[in-house]
């Protein structure tokens, strides 16, 4: 495909984990990429590997989505480069483990900024153009955390509930426009998330941890089909549905137990 005719995909958190695997899938399907990540070194390495393997154009944007102005900077960078995204992947996000009152409040507010505000802002900047062109796909990475409260990760679970609800609503609003919106809701996945969140040694990450490439493939296929909610892994699908049929208090207690550290 000629460079000027290739579709463009914007991927946040695209230098590692699920975001990197999604970037590879998009490149394999002939998309030029704009990948956003906080760490310039990892971003450059990822961009170089994708370019050499798939022969597509990769634009690197080293930005911290904790900065409220970052989405506007991203939009301006794409406009100045003459790139119009046909696919938006809102993958960037992070979590923190611990009681709400003991965690740093500034970091938790930054989590809200990255997980919710930046995702909403980027969607608001690029979704109207997709609808106007009557083509486009949005993939928002939520989590199985979206389906119940999460003691010891209260803000993270709440932020992912927002992402799921927001995505489902947009999937309904965009029906018939040529644009689809999908929420990818992975369970525990082998990425850097576990270490940054402080989840090492918890029951949550002791079994049924999925591979990032498998999660990305499941979400990518769901996005291409226009499926509103994609939950990879049969255990994750069962658990996500099970919380509908148990008392809310019980689901909350079980979730807390999964986040508590166990002795080796």
Image (tube, rainbow, N blue to C red):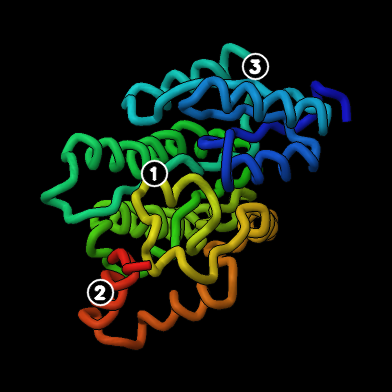
Which residue lies under the disc numbered 1? Answer: 196
Q: Nearer the viewer, mark 2 or mark 3?
A: 2
Q: Is residue 201 above or below residue 63?
A: below
Pointers 1 and 2 in contact (CB under 8 A)? no
Q: Nearer the viewer, mark 1 or mark 2?
A: 1
Query: Which residue shows up at 40% across the image and 56% down it?
Result: 200
Q: Is residue 98 above or below residue 256?
A: above
Q: Nearer the viewer, residue 263 or 141?
A: 263
**Separation of disc 2 and disc 3 at Cα?**
48 Å
Quarter of the image for residue 66 reads: top left
Residue 11 percent location from the top left of the image: 57, 36
Query: Which residue shows up at 82% across the image and 33% down it?
Result: 54
Label disc, if present, on residue 252 of the rendered structure: 2
* Kind of element beneath mark 1: helix
Query: Which residue shows up at 58% across the image and 12% down it?
Result: 80
**Separation of disc 1 and disc 2 at Cα?**
23 Å
**Separation of disc 3 and disc 1 at Cα?**
35 Å
Which residue lies under the disc numbered 3? Answer: 82
Q: Earlier in the sequence, mark 1 or mark 2?
A: 1
Residue 160 percent location from the top left of the image: 37, 55
Query: Which residue shows up at 25% across the image and 86% down it?
Result: 247
């Amino acid at each position: 495909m000629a460079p000027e005719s290739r579709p463009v995909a914007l991927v946040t958190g695209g230098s590692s984990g699920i975001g990197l695997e999604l970037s590879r899938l998009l490149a394999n399907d002939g998309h030029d990429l704009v990948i956003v990540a906080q760490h310039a070194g990892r971003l450059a390495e990822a961009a170089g590997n994708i370019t050499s393997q798939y022969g597509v154009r990769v634009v690197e944007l080293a930005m911290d989505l904790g900065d409220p102005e970052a989405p506007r900077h991203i939009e301006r960078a794409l406009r100045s480069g003459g790139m119009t995204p046909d696919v938006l992947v809102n993958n960037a996000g992070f979590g923190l483990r611990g009681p709400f009152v003991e965690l740093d409040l500034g970091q938790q507010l930054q989590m809200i900024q990255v997980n919710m505000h930046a995702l909403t802002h980027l969607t608001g900047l690029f979704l109207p153009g997709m609808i106007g062109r009557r083509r486009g796909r949005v993939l928002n990475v939520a989590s199985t955390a979206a389906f119940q409260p999460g003691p010891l990760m209260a803000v993270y679970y709440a932020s992912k509930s927002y992402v799921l609800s927001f995505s489902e609503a947009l999937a309904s609003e965009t029906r018939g426009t040529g644009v689809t919106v999908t929420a990818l809701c992975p369970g525990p996945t082998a990425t850097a998330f576990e270490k940054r969140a402080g989840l090492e040694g918890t029951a949550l990450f002791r079994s049924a941890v999925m591979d990032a490439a498998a999660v990305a493939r499941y979400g990518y296929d769901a996005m291409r089909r226009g499926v509103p909610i994609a939950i990879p892994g049969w255990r994750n699908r069962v658990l996500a549905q099970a919380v509908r049929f148990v008392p809310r208090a019980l689901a909350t207690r079980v979730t807390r137990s999964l986040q508590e550290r166990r002795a080796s």
